[in-house]
Image: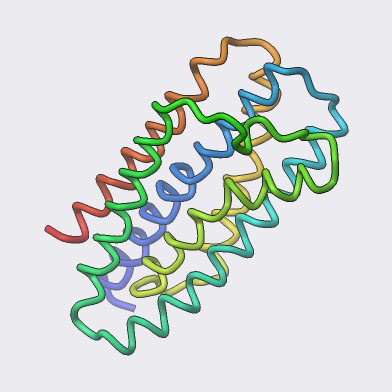
Amino acid sequence: MGLGGIYEGWGQLVTVTIMAVALGMDAFSLGVGIGMKGIRLLHVLQLSLLIAFFHVLMPLLGLFTGSYVGHLLGQVTTYAAGGLLVLLGGHMVFNSFRQEEGSSRQMDHRSVWGMLLISLSVSVDSFSVGVSLGMFVNSIILTVLAFGLCGGMMSITGLLLGRRVSRGLGDYGEALGGAILLAFGLLFIF
């Protein structure tokens, strides 16, 4: 492997890590909101493990879809991946500033269905990012493990921190994650 291959490998590692953290911000912000309502440590562990699982499953499905689409579209894939990230990032930023009634933030986090729906809701955007990354990433295992690890750790952090801080931090965390994805999308396009 030449110097260019090493540089490309590190570049992909940095990109995947930053995107994993950006996607984990949604789990973090949700965790802060739930933690503010009060949560037992057993539920912190259960919910975080479910979020980590879905943060592995959803991007894995997205990576396979993106790889297939990448072979079909050829050279256009970079622009398609960038456009998808711009849309997803913009959507996350927009959602962080609007108040939602009856959303996943209002679900009962103690029930099995509530935990499943909350975990899935914060992991759906990982599918879209997985599609984008599937068009150019080489290491699928590293990518999905980074997403799962960041999603799980950031949800634990958010849940525990939410027990101690104000609710406003959660919205800013989701906005920051959306801004990071938006920036990466623009980098892909330009």
Q: Is 176 displayed left or right of 105 in the figure?
A: left
Residue 153, position as x, y percentages in the image: 64, 39
Viewer-closest of 47 and 15: 47
Find residue 44 and report its horizontal and vertical position in percent.
78, 33
Residue at point 57%, 29% (across, down): 101
Splitting the image into 4 quarters, where does residue 5 fall?
bottom left
Q: What's the residue at 48%, 43% (across, down)?
A: 21
Q: Where is residue 40? Give x, y as percent.
A: 85, 25
**Nearest the eye: 48 or 90:** 90
Front one among 138 and 167: 167
Q: Position of residue 133 (x, y in %)?
A: 39, 66
* 54 displayed left or right of 139: right
Where is 10 relative to 75, above or below? above
Colour scheme in use: rainbow
Q: Is residue 152 left or right of residue 136?
A: right
**Image label count:** 0
Q: Residue at x 61, y 24 (%)?
A: 32
